[in-house]
Image (spheres, grey):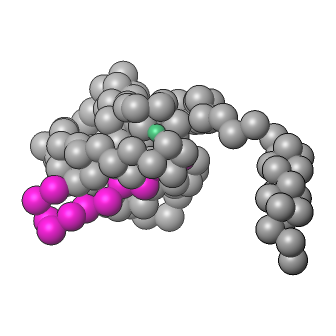
């Protein structure tokens, strides 16, 4: 193949692609459905939220439990916290989790991966802009 022609073809191919833009969309996350019963707090739509955030339930739960200083468990769709936590607090913690561990601080994209490095470190890797941001491990 003639190199000049090849370049021209490549240029044409690029012209056909939509412009590359950084995704700034916000995830459509339902607020946590929190039910307090007895001395337990249930997040009824926990699995669904984690799926939208693209985060392992165990990771999100570990964050919540650490912040709340409580024990708990994920059972099916539901997270169970052994203790009483106000729905407002759960909502705030979920918002904090999204802010710190989902959205890329550089470009704002939620298209990220949370990676634990050597136990002590955590990084937020952005699939949209490529930024690697160290985050507070939990
Ligand atoms: Zn980014």
- Decide if residue 119 is in sight here: yes
34, 98: nearer the viewer: 98
Residue drawn 48% across the image and 30% down it: 108
User: Can you give x and y, in whole percent of width and height, for residue 8 in the image?
Assistant: 86, 55
User: Can you give x and y, in whole percent of width and height, for residue 85 in the image?
Assistant: 27, 33
User: Can you give x and y, in whole percent of width and height, for residue 67 in the image?
Assistant: 19, 39
Residue drawn 40% across the image and 32% down it: 106
Q: Which image quadrant is residue 55 in?
A: bottom left
Dominant secondary structure (helix, strand or loop) of the stretch shown in magenta: strand
User: Can you give x and y, in whole percent of width and height, for residue 101 in the image?
Assistant: 35, 42
Residue drawn 45% across the image and 48% down it: 130
Left or right: where 126 falls relative to 15: left
Left or right: where 83 falls relative to 126: left
Residue drawn 14% across the image and 65% down it: 119
110, 106: nearer the viewer: 106
Q: Which image quadrant is residue 92 in?
A: top left
Q: Residue at the top extreme? A: 88
- Decide if residue 63 is in sight here: no
Left or right: where 7 falls relative to 130: right
Reply yes or no: does residue 116 show up in magenta. yes
Looking at the rendered structure, the number of numbered marks drawn on it comes to 0
Reply yes or no: does residue 7 show up in magenta. no
Q: Residue at the bottom extreme? A: 1
Quadrant where the N terminus is found in the figure: bottom right
Q: Which residues are magenta?
A: 111-121
């Amino acid at each position: 193949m003639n190199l000049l022609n090849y370049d021209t073809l490549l240029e044409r191919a690029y012209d056909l692609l939509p412009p590359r833009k950084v995704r700034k969309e916000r995830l459509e996350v339902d607020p946590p459905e929190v039910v307090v019963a007895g001395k337990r707090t249930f997040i009824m739509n926990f699995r669904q939220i984690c799926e939208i955030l693209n985060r392992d339930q165990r990771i999100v739960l570990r964050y919540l439990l650490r912040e709340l200083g409580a024990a708990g468990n994920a059972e099916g769709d539901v997270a169970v916290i052994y203790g009483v936590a106000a729905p407002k607090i759960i909502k705030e913690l979920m918002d904090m989790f999204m802010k710190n561990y989902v959205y890329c601080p550089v470009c704002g994209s939620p298209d990220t991966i949370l990676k634990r490095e050597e136990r002590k470190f955590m990084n937020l890797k952005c699939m949209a802009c490529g930024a690697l941001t160290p985050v507070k491990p939990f």
